[in-house]
Image (spheres, rainbow, N blue to C red):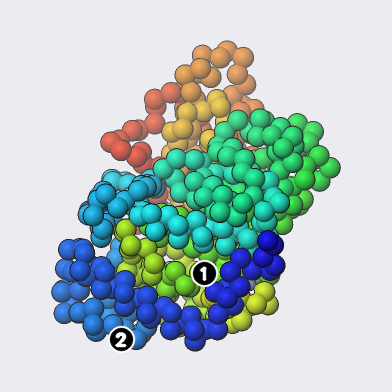
Amino acid sequence: MEKGQYWNEKIETLPTEEIKKLQLQKLREQVKHCYENSSFYRKKFDSVNLKPEDIKTLDDLKKIPFTVKSDLKENYPFGMVTVPSDEIVEVHASSGTTGNPIVGAYTKGDMEMWQEIMARSIYTAGGRRQDVIHIAYGYGLFTGGLGFHYGVQKLGAKIVPASGGMTQRQIKLMKDLGVTMLACTPSFAVYLAETMAQEGVVPQRDLKLKRGMFGAEPWSDKIRERIQKDLGIEAFDVYGLTELCGPGVSVECNQHDGLHIWEDHFIVETIDPNTGESLPNGEEGELVFTTLTKTGMPMLRYRTRDISKINREKCKCGRTHARMQRITGRSDDMLIIRGVNVFPSQVEYAVMCFSELATQYLIVVDRPGALDTFVVKVELCEKACKDTQLDRNSLKSEIQKRIHIVTGISADVEIVKPGELPRTEGKAKRVLDLRKGKM
Ligand SMILES: [Zn+2]
């Protein structure tokens, strides 16, 4: 049976007052669950003399102390789980920049909830049962690949679980299998489009591709325009993080004016990242989420470090759930170079595009005079280093071009020998910002 415009019409168009009622009821249950089953949350509550019964209105949420990323790292791996260990049926993890990874632990119910909001998100972005959906997010611990996989499964469309890598073969499959929808990171979409151009594949002529869902890294409107034009598709932004479940927390509708946050599962707040004070709707600040329906590893007032603002005006699509402005950056990692926001993940992506390079890289930013310098040091892999035919100058200019496409600014690239960049325990240092103290 076809569903019409909405995946779940009743919930998606629920009047705001009803959403609030639902949220309050779920919040009170969640708070009680956390207090009774987690020494971590009980300590937090006790530290401010708060009892679950004190949460009587949605506004009382503000009395609960924040949960932050370091809480998850300190309680790695399962210190924040609030159910008996045998109720956890799946675990995911995201790579942090330092120390322990962030782990997400799911009960059977949490998996069903994730699958439901992913299906709803894909449907909101126009995905239907008749679609052939190519998932080029990485499969594995990362929530991108499997999150989409579960959602498409629920939707009942055809899944092509391509994962990452082997771009040429991916393009062939997209062509041969009649792929109509693409899910991947925005930078991989750009790379796909470029590889297609090199291979003489014209998406508008050779593919049935109509739309794509892109997320897991910050992207600009410029990149969106490029993806839409080069692939001949409509691009939708999708948002989520491992701490909350993975992708599917919010998604763009066909109005492309912000991402609807599924408020029957999450409460969103914005705060001043410096003072922690709550901000009114429409003011830009750090997003803070409370999970209402997750029971395995619930988050109360989790600080995402993502900067955005909330729009509660009614959307033309008819959905009543609040919208967040697309994420332009994670406050933790962002560098501002010559006035442009640059993320190490963008440079990383550019480096990954070259088989001649190892995965190690180092971004060096300095300000010797009035202007920032932006140097990216990359390492040749062993094989490329031994290759006497390799034209290092043209490789260098190709890398520079790619970094420019991804970040929007030009970098000086230095190619060094294998093993030359510094390595440390765990994840390597990626950024050396020599401007600090010169500002
Ligand atoms: Zn909408």
Residue 400 percent coordinates (x, y): 60, 38
Q: Is residue 229 left or right of residue 53?
A: right
Residue drawn 33% across and 33% down?
423
Most distant residue in the right direction: 205
Residue drawn 44% across and 45% down?
142
- The amino acid type found where label 1 is placed reads Ile
| Mark 1 nearby-residue class (10 Å; few <14, some 14–19, many ≥20) | many
Q: Quadrant of the N terminus?
A: bottom right
Q: Is residue 271 above or below residue 415?
A: below
Where is mark 2, residue-wise?
56
Asked whether 403 or 228 is in front, the reply is 228
Sequence-earlier tag: 2 or 1: 2
Residue drawn 51% across and 69% down?
261
| SS class, disc 1 | strand
Where is mark 1, residue-wise?
261
Which quadrant of the view contains residue 243? bottom left
- The amino acid type found where label 2 is placed reads Lys
Residue 53 percent coordinates (x, y): 23, 82
Residue 387 percent coordinates (x, y): 56, 14
Q: Is residue 389 above or below residue 365?
A: above
Residue drawn 35% across and 48% down?
89
- Quick check: is the Cβ at mark 2 less than 8 Å away from ligand 1? no
